[in-house]
Amino acid sequence: MRIIEVPSPRHARLELFKLGADPAGVRIMCEKSVFRALKLNDVPTIAANIIKQEMLSYGGEAATSYGSLDLSAKKTDLLIMGTLKQFTLLCRKLLLHQFSLPRLSKQIARTLKNYDGIPEPVTINGKKLVFGKKTYIMGVLNVTPDSFSDGGKFFSLKDALNRAEEMIKEGADLIDIGGESTRPGADPVPAGIELERVLPVIKILRKKRVMISIDTRKALVAEAAVKAGAGIINDISGLRYDKKMAKVAAKYNVPVIVMHTSGTPRKMQKRTGYRDLIGEIMEYLDKSVEIAENAGVPRSCVIIDPGFGFGKTPEQNLEILRRIREFRSMGNPILIGTSRKSTIGSVLGLPPDQRIEGTSATLAIAISGGVDIIRVHDVKKMKRTAKMADAIVRRI
């Protein structure tokens, strides 16, 4: 006798076929084999109570705040619990109701589909990233004198190009070029200086068979970098710092990476108070995706990054890793950058250049949780980590 893990419909189908179940029975039982707990925030009390009663009628469960029971609260958070089959029945029934329930029905169905689905491919520099089959490696190239881990090492054009060439040989799929340090406490750099640092590197690297990412918060820098050969914009502010950034991405038809942070690098570590860490990060990223869409960037061309190390305590960063799979419900590809960061140092008591094993552990956990792209300094070693993790978790 044993308990088996059935985390997704794919796993359910595999186990049912192993039993020799009839294909028709597999189709019927598959949705009954997978359990989900879905959280909605700020649902109107009347709608929440209807959802609760409907889910109970199908054998599922739903929890609301106490204030929703006596109608003293106008809105409530709602936790719906049940099998995929029960959710399917619920969504069908909600389409027949009032009180914005048809809209909620579609949102619930889309969220469940996203969680178990695979993001659409993204094209960068004419190359397509096809998700679900492997983890892509983004190599970090800081053309700065003050980045937290390798500041100054690749500040000259020669050193930067040599390092880029080395990362390409080690198996980097993308090179992320940044001319402004965004470590905690860092001061901003004028756009002109940032351009002087990154453009020469991009113009030469564009001739190589590698995808180029520009790591910047400034629309002016992003536009010049894209013209020079960058194929994706990596904005740590989630399109908030410069209101023109999303329009640049739309104008040149390039994807964007939007990251969560709680403020500018100088002040972000003073803003680590969260009521609902994962919920607030996802709400922020949802807004970033909306900003991109409103500017003309397709949702499928937006990659999300929960911002490990940006405006979070070590404990909060570890919680992000433990719960990284929850971000799959947004339906966007997920990127994470844990490489050599201070949370690893706080756990192991080691300086940045000795955090390779810690980085490897964090990335293996992230990949097992569904991350699609990892941003790393040590390309060769982390590519091996990713290949091993992929062999374990992408087996179905």
Image: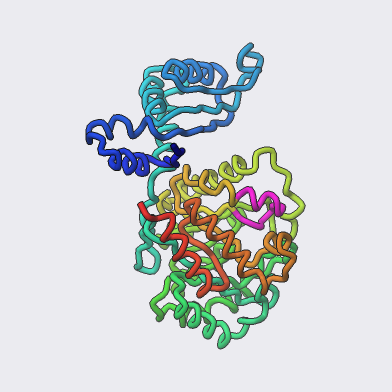
Front-most of 345 and 199? 345
> Is residue 140 positioned above or below 396 on the image?
below
Residue shown at 41% from the left, 21% from the top: 94
Work out whether 346 lies above or below 35.
below
Residue lying at the far bottom of the rendered structure: 158
- Please tell me whether residue 308 belongs to the stretch shown in magenta: yes
Task: Give the farthest residue toward the top.
Answer: 70
Instruction: Tell me the quarter of the picture where residue 45 sits.
Output: top right
Nearer to me, 116 or 50: 116
Q: Residue at x 42, y 62 (%)?
A: 252
Location of residue 358 in the rendering, given as x and y in whole percent from the top left corner: 63, 64
In the rendered view, would you say 105 is above or below 148? Answer: above
Q: How is the image coloured?
A: rainbow
- Horizontally, residue 118 falls left or right of residue 291, namely left
Q: Is residue 254 visible?
A: no
Q: Which residues are magenta?
A: 307-320
Would you say residue 69 is visible in this rendering?
A: yes
Question: Between residues 38 and 381, which one lies in front from this camera angle?
Answer: 381
The N terminus is located in which quarter?
top left
Whether the magenta-drawn stretch holds residue 71 is answered as no
How many labels were placed on the picture? 0
